[in-house]
Amino acid sequence: MSGPQGAPSPVHEVAVAILDARQREVVQRALDAHGTKLGALLPVLHAIQHELQYVPPGAVPLIAERLALSRAEVHGVISFYHDFRDRPPAGKVIKLCRAEACQAVGAVALEAHARRTLGVDADGRSRDGRYTLEPAYCLGNCACGPSLLVDDELHALVTPQRFDELVAEEGK
């Protein structure tokens, strides 16, 4: 990420001002690990999100420059895929399956219950900042729906009552 004669590029200088040291390190590590691979963008984004829990908007210019993409292309991928976030999640992340198999056994009603119980706003964050409720488009647990993940722990056959128990357990 350097300009003529090895000097830092203008994009790099802006990223230094926007990203903190840890974020810069994570982005650089992801780019170093995956940046030369064919189709590097998704692996780079996944690596960044795995470590930071989101892809900071300030990372977009660095990623674009390194992968010879436009900022719009990088932003488009982040905004298209539901799994990527452009800001840190609030507290615990709950991913509720919205695939057809889970919908057929009560996921829509479970989502409505979860939104009411957690006080989730339109952006998926609870008003108290303790939870982020996100859609998942198949958790691969179709025979045991409705299913959800709390952080990375899978829960099956979740009823509104079981949801309340899970939230109570997390609150302890």
Image: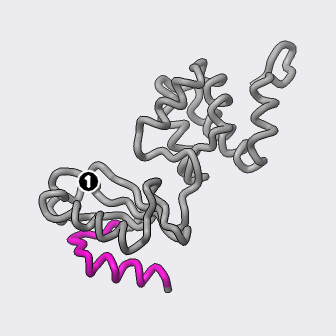
Amino acid type of disc 1?
A: Arg
Q: Position of residue 80 (x, y in %)?
A: 42, 35
Q: Nearer the viewer, residue 133 or 36?
A: 133
156 to the left or right of 12: left
Q: Nearer the viewer, residue 29 or 127?
A: 127
Residue 108 vertical position relative to residue 36 in the rendered view, above or below:
below
119 to the left or right of 73: left
Q: Quadrant of residue 152?
A: bottom left
Mark 1 residue element:
loop
Q: Position of residue 155 (x, y in %)?
A: 30, 70
**What residue is shown at x 48% (from left), y 44% (from top)?**
84
Magenta range: 154-171
Magenta stretch prevailing secondary structure = helix
Residue farthest along the top direction in this orientation: 4
Q: Is residue 20 magenta?
A: no
Dot 1 crowding, Cα within 10 Å, few <14, some 14–19, many 20+ = many
Q: Which residue matches tag 1?
A: 98
Residue 69 vertical position relative to residue 116 in the rendered view, above or below:
above
Colour mode?
one colour
Q: Nearer the viewer, residue 11 or 153?
A: 11
